[in-house]
Amino acid sequence: MPALAVQDATRAGERRLATTLGSLVHDLREARIGSPAILVIGEVCRETNANSIRPLLESAPRASAR
């Protein structure tokens, strides 16, 4: 199953990793991807790639302020 990780999304130091769910933990450690990070898992990852993650981030539902 495909997986994407985006560290520091929308910031100057944004880093991206495209991998599979089975390799996610290993690949995150190898790439030293840490918090804050967004994980996207599933077939939706086939609709994009690590270089075009921004549309996914921009269309994600936002938490409402209370």
Image (spheres, rainbow, N blue to C red):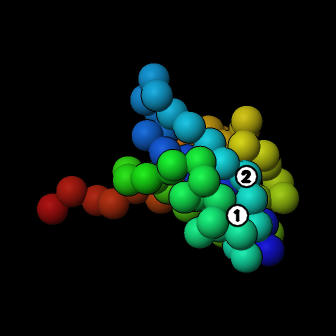
Seen in the image, is 65 located left or right of residue 2? left
> What residue sits 73% from the left and 52% below the top?
18
SS type, badge 1: strand
Of pointers 2 and 1, the one earlier in the residue sequence: 1
Quadrant where the C terminus sits is: bottom left
Crowding near pointer 2: few (<14 within 10 Å), some, many (20+)? Answer: some
> What residue sits 56% from the left and 37% below the top?
15
Crowding near pointer 1: few (<14 within 10 Å), some, many (20+)? Answer: many
Seen in the image, is 54 located left or right of residue 37? right
Query: Can you say whether 37 is above or below 20 in the image?
Result: above
SS type, badge 2: strand
Query: Can you say whether 26 is above or below 12 in the image?
Result: below
The one of 48 and 29 positioned closer to us in this rendering: 29
The x and y percentages for residue 38 are 50, 56
Query: Can you say whether 27 is above or below 59 in the image?
Result: below
Q: Residue furthest front?
A: 30
Instruction: Check disc 2 and give the amino acid type.
Output: Ala
User: Which disc, if any, is residue 18?
Assistant: 2
The x and y percentages for residue 28 are 57, 58
Q: Distance between the residues labelled 2 and 1?
A: 6 Å
Seen in the image, is 30 located left or right of residue 48? left
User: Which disc, if any, is residue 56?
Assistant: none
Instruction: Tell me, yes or no, if residue 42 can be seen here.
Output: no
> What residue sits 84% from the left and 59% below the top?
46
Instruction: Tell me, yes or no, if residue 28 can be seen here.
Output: yes
Quadrant where the N terminus sits is: bottom right
- Give the residue pinned by disc 1: 3
What is the tally of numbered marks visible in this picture?
A: 2
Q: Which residue lies furthest to the left in this view?
A: 66
Instruction: Check disc 1 and give the amino acid type.
Output: Ala
> What residue sits 74% from the left and 59% below the top?
19
